[in-house]
Amino acid sequence: MTTKTILVTGGAGFIGSHVVRLLVNKYPDYSIINLDALTYAGNLANVADLEEESNYSFVKADITDLEAMRKIFAVYPIDTVVHLAAESHVDRSIEDPLIFVKTNLVGTATLLQAAREAWKGAHDGKLFYHVSTDEVYGSLGETGFFTEETPYDPRSPYSSSKAGSDHLVRAWHHTFDLPVVLSNCSNNYGPYQFPEKLIPLFINNIRNEKPLPVYGKGVNVRDWLYVEDHARAIDLILHEGRVGETYNIGGHNEWRNIDLIKVICRTMDEKLGRPAGSSEELITYVTDRAGHDMRYAIDASKLKEDLGWTPSLQFEEGIAKTIDWYLENEEWMRGVTSGAYKDYYDSMYKNR
Ligand code: NAD
Ligand code: TDX
């Protein structure tokens, strides 16, 4: 018997695929519907292992299409939404901001409205879970951490569209009583991440002996979390989080970009049997990202104290696992880097 019907949006993307996998495998009595528009970032190869599972289904649809969203709620008895679908890459938001406004703001509002209409105020057992980012809090100096109380101060079209989507979710809660929960997570890494993001891009370039484009001086700091630990946190918040609350998720694992890149270079030299130092020779300093946030760091103590979550993987283990995965899954990389990806890469890096 199905005890819960969960609509996961963006489940063919990086984090969404791990969330869908965890829910499908852990809860055979739940029905998991993966809704994704399959943009350049969405790839059914990311969830190919789940296709045959009886508690899993896939729907191709666009979250900005209200009629399509109404239809999903009419067809399936959805009681829970886990909303990850978004445009997610900061550099793309600088090149083409309007699609971020459309997907992240209009898309989130459309989904909220469809849920509200379907649930008609009968909110018992219902939940709209919005997955967001630490970037909404802005940029830190050398010290301090983002807490759930940190005022919003987004600076890129991406982070401001995510900040706006968080506000929309809270507005539907306060105005229409929609049961919501939110989480804001730091940078994720791991298998199935699209190679426009730092870690998979650099792994792929090292393998192909291509330059490693480090923005600015490489001194910006990010707080990295293994993607399966994020998925575990989402599972926990989904089941035990308090309605109306926000939880920060982070790895307490800060790295300056250049130091992280050197770890990847050294590990890749060893794994590929190349002379020590050869990957570092590929490092090329390029024009900085416009408005590049200096440092992100999350204080995840609320999640730890209230719900008992801590990251399970140390970074050294996580990054080694991640590199192994990309090296073993060349075909996946070839699939996602063919065609349109090449045009993206050529245009994004040609003037740097
Ligand atoms: P991603 O770009 O890998 O995946 C996004 C998915 O959303 C893709 O499968 C894409 O096809 C789908 N999508 C895009 N537009 C859509 C639309 N209009 N309708 C339906 N589906 C659509 O992103 P990700 O890195 O997996 O991030 C997932 C979520 O987590 C995002 O909301 C992001 O803001 C958030 N987040 C990401 C990170 C990170 O480090 N990657 C950290 C914190 C929060
Ligand atoms: O080629 C590059 N060179 C480089 O120096 C790329 C792609 C990135 N960088 C730098 C920019 C950042 O300081 O590396 C850092 C990480 O960059 P990204 O992987 O693009 O991540 P970031 O901009 O930090 O945003 C990520 O974390 C928060 C995700 O893309 C977001 O979706 C998430 O919300």
Image: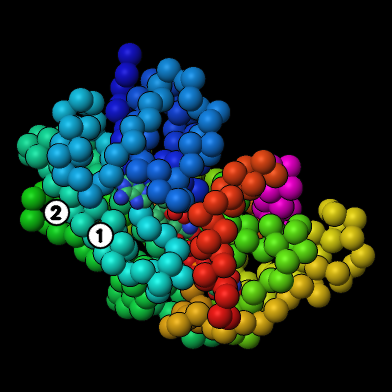
Report whether 35 appears left or right of 254: left
Q: What residue did someone put label 2 on?
A: 172
In the picture, measured across the screen, residue 262 lies left or right of residue 122, that is right
Query: Gap in Å between the C-alphas at discs 2 and 1?
Result: 18 Å
Residue 17 in picture, x, y percent from top left: 48, 41
Above or below: residue 223 compared with residue 85: below
Q: Residue at x 21, y 57 (%)?
A: 106
Residue 325 counted in the magenta span:
yes
Kindly identify the residue that appears in the image at 67 percent across and 41 percent down: 331
The image shows residue 80, relative to residue 256, as above or below, that is above
Which of the marked residues, 2 or 1, is nearer the chain's N terminus? 1
What span is in magenta?
316-329
Dividing the picture into quadrants, the one containing residue 268 is bottom right
Q: How is the image coloured?
A: rainbow
Say left or right for 159 vs 69. Answer: right
Secondary structure mostly seen in magenta is: helix
Report the disc number at residue 192: none
Q: Is residue 196 above or below residue 137?
A: above
Is residue 70 shown to the viewer in this render? yes
Q: How busy is the neighbourhood of tag 2: few (under 14 within 10 Å), some, or many (20 plus)? A: some
Q: Is mark 1 within 8 Å of ligand 1?
A: yes
Mark 2 falls on what kind of element? Answer: helix
* Residue 261: x %, y % from top left: 70, 70
For label 1, the residue is 102
Amino acid type, callout 1: Lys
Rendered location of residue 243, percent (x, y): 24, 48
